[in-house]
Image (cartoon, grey):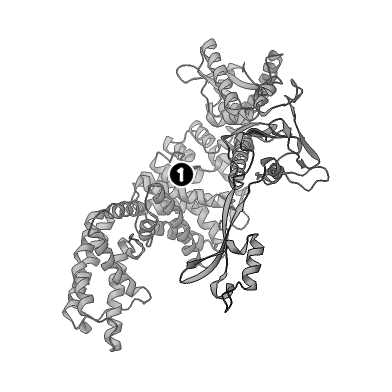
């Protein structure tokens, strides 16, 4: 009998894109774990390994067989299983035969008042070695952002497969994929190593390290960190480690060796962002600083190999960076020959979207929309001028040589060039900040002008795209509208601007409608945008640990500011702990429930016959005056107390008044009264959405 063994699976390929490696490694580990669990194979652990040329997993202490299981199968009902003589029917005999059991082993069990025939069957586990060839599907079923085909094979994979190791103990598990058969041969470093034979899964790391391959990603990272640390101490430098860059570099090398190089000090006159982008984003270099955070004319990079001929590698990297920085210096000097206004004029030749005109058209919309939004917030006259000026110039750097080459620097270069041209610092800062937040967890704009311009730019893009039918579907969002909507919600919340999403959407659509850019009915576009923003706001609330039902209840009406909606949600979440909250919710929900399918009609006071309905009408009139005031001022606790105060009137009304009376005039009037009261209640929340556990 074979004892418990380790299992090694390695997929050897041509170099994978660095950005795919980490996720693919985790995917292979997860798929292997799921496969083992589904097949009832016990194991101690699953380890994952990867380099640019390989993905691998090792299962430690894999059981030699599947676990045995006992299954219970249900057959026909007792009426069908037994005939009138209480003998087994043909159906019962067929069931026993199908399950592979004797008739004597059959038994009856009651299920929901009916007795059924059952059989227990012992299923013996198969040998693990018999099952392992099926890991072929585990390999071929992996998903990657991009795939390719090679030769005449139909398989689509991240890169062509060149070798496969499938080793259970010292035995090769037979697998064949795209003409490649499994074995025990692996391949070392492309230039420094050779083929190596793996005799046992436990030899894997050491065997490949001899061939200049470090298969454990965390070990490679540790080597890079320690070598950078040693270089810092040797040179008296500070080398900040960008974790994303480290992850990428780590997935580009199999045998890391850190080295440094330098560039001419004259390049330090370029904006720091240009230098850092050239090094980090384009060359995968780590910039070097002094102990005061000032950039030094050096860089650090990681070689895929050992220290042989390291001087030549250093010179080659320096030559490449020198050419890149020379280009950047040329761009920097040339760009300054145009004023921001001259550059902005060129935006009339840059298409924003074929149905929406040029970026020049967009900036003119931003000027109008920015002033409209800022006026709603009653900012100062000076701030209005700053917003108008920043809107006119916010995209001018898109026509510069620098941004054409380094697209990551849009906004940043606009700020630099604007300051060099003598623009006010507020304008320059807004040019940079109006793109923020660019991604989740990015900073929001720090200035008034920047934050309002960011909102303006984003809502114009969303409204314009929705207006011509470009609405995100599934994973398709080419204009990043979800991210931009989330950015608007985040800014409105952080600044607590007294501006509702409804106001914002209305202002954007006003301008698009005036310029005849809406290709769909305005009302439809408005509704679609509100739904879109609600989804982003719900994400914000859920991130703050707000229950889904509470979130839904406050998102009924988006005429409140984002800040007020967040406060309402947090308030209601806290109220869940109060013993009387359920009674309040049920009372308010009785009103909104009876009014939900009714249209709004005027209430005739003369038709209010019963005293409870008169009392409720008085309570409504007071609520309609004071509730909006409290919500507008953000006094959530006071607003809720107003709702609590009308609870006795609601209970009295439903105890003594029949809404659905036979008299049509009275019935319609009472329903109208419910509709008007419901509208006020729903200013705070739609309490019907709130769920209480039984």
Q: On the rendered structure, is 604 left or right of 11?
A: left
Query: Residue furthest toward the left?
Result: 611
Query: Residue furthest toward the bottom?
Result: 663
Residue 627 at what x, y percent from top left?
A: 25, 62
Residue 92 at what x, y percent from top left?
A: 61, 69
Is residue 151 visible to the viewer in this orientation of the structure? yes
Front-lying residue, 92 or 140:
92
Quarter of the N terminus within the rendering:
top right
Q: On the rendered structure, is 594 left or right of 354?
A: left
Residue 106 found in image quarter: bottom right
Residue 615 at what x, y percent from top left?
A: 17, 74
Q: Is residue 168 above or below residue 94?
A: above
Q: Is residue 393 above or below residue 50?
A: below
The residue that appears at 58% across and 37% down in the rendered structure is 43
How many numbered badges does the structure rendering display? 1
Residue 333 at what x, y percent from top left?
A: 60, 28
Front-lying residue, 689 or 242:
689
Front-lying residue, 173 or 591:
173
Residue carrying label 1: 389
Mark 1 is surrounded, within 10 Å at the Cα level, by few (under 14), some (14 to 19) or many (20 or more) other residues, namely many
The residue that appears at 73% across and 25% down in the rendered structure is 188
Q: On the rendered structure, is 254 left or right of 388?
A: right
The residue that appears at 53% across and 57% down in the rendered structure is 464
Residue 622 found in image quarter: bottom left
Is residue 333 visible to the viewer in this orientation of the structure? no
Query: Residue furthest toward the top?
Result: 234
The residue that appears at 52% across and 25% down in the rendered structure is 241
Quarter of the C terminus within the rendering:
bottom left
Front-lying residue, 435 or 659:
659
Secondary structure beneath label 1: helix
Q: On the rendered structure, is 535 left or right of 280?
A: left
């Amino acid at each position: 009998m074979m004892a418990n063994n380790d299992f090694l699976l390695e997929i050897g390929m041509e170099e994978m894109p660095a950005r795919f490696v980490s996720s693919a490694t985790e995917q292979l580990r997860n798929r292997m774990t799921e496969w083992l669990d589904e097949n009832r194979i016990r194991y101690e652990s699953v380890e994952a390994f990867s380099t640019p040329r390989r993905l691998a997993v090792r299962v430690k202490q894999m059981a030699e067989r599947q676990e045995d299981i006992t299954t219970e199968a249900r057959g026909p009902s007792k009426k069908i299983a037994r005939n009138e003589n209480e003998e087994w029917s043909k159906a019962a005999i067929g069931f026993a035969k199908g399950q592979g059991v004797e008739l004597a082993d059959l038994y009856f069990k009651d299920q929901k008042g009916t007795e059924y025939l059952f059989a227990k069957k012992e299923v013996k586990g198969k040998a693990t070695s018999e099952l392992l060839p099926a890991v072929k599907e585990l390999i071929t079923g992996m998903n990657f952002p991009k795939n390719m085909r090679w030769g005449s094979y139909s398989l689509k994979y991240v890169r062509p497969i060149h070798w496969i190791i499938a080793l259970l103990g010292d035995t090769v598990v037979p697998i064949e994929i795209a003409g490649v058969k499994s074995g025990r041969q692996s391949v070392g470093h492309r230039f420094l190593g050779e083929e190596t034979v793996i005799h046992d899964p436990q030899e894997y790391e050491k065997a490949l390290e001899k061939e200049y391959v470090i298969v454990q990603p965390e070990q490679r990272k540790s080597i890079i960190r320690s070598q950078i640390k040693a270089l810092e101490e040797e040179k008296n430098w500070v080398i900040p480690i960008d974790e994303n860059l480290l992850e990428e570099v780590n997935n580009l090398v199999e045998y890391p060796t850190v080295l440094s190089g330098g560039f001419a000090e004259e390049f330090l006159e370029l904006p720091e962002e240009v230098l850092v982008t050239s090094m980090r984003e384009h060359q995968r270099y780590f910039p070097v600083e002094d102990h005061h955070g000032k950039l030094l004319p050096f860089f650090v990079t990681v070689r895929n190999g050992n220290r042989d001929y390291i001087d030549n590698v250093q010179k080659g990297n320096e030559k490449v960076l020198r050419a890149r920085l020379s280009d950047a210096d040329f761009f920097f000097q040339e760009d300054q020959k145009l004023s921001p206004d001259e550059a902005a004029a060129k935006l009339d030749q840059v298409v924003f979207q074929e149905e929406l005109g040029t970026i020049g058209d967009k900036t003119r919309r931003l000027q109008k929309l920015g002033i409209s939004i800022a006026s709603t917030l009653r900012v100062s006259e000076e701030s209005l001028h700053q917003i108008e000026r920043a809107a006119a110039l916010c995209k001018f750097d898109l026509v510069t040589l620098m941004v054409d080459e380094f697209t990551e620097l849009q906004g940043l270069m606009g700020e630099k060039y604007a300051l060099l041209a003598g623009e006010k610092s507020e304008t320059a800062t807004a040019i940079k900040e109006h793109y923020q937040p660019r991604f989740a967890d990015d900073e929001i704009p720090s200035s008034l002008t920047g934050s309002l311009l960011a909102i303006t730019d984003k809502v114009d893009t969303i409204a314009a795209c929705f207006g011509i039918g470009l609405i995100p579907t599934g994973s398709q969002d080419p204009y990043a509208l979800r991210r931009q909507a989330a950015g608007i919600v985040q800014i409105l919340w952080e600044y607590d601007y007294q501006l509702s999403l409804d106001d914002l959407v209305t202002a954007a659509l006003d301008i698009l409608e005036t310029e005849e850019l809406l290709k769909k009915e305005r009302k439809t576009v408005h509704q679609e945008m509100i739904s879109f923003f609600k989804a982003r706001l719900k994400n914000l609330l859920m991130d703050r640990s707000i229950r889904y039902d509470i979130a839904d209840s406050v998102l009924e009406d988006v005429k409140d500011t984002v800040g007020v909606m967040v406060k309402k949600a947090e308030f209601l979440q806290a109220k869940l702990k109060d013993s009387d909250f359920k009674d309040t919710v049920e009372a308010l929900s009785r009103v909104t429930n009876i009014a939900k399918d009714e249209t709004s009609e005027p209430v005739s006071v003369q038709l209010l016959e019963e005293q409870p309905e008169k009392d409720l009408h008085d309570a409504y009139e007071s609520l309609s005056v004071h509730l909006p005031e409290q919500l507008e001022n953000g006094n959530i606790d006071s607003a809720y107390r107003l709702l609590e105060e009308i609870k006795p009137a609601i209970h009295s009304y439903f105890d003594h008044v029949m809404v659905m009376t036979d008299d049509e005039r009275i019935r319609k009037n009472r329903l109208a009264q419910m509709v008007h009261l419901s509208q006020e209640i729903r200013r705070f929340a739609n309490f019907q959405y709130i769920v209480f556990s039984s």
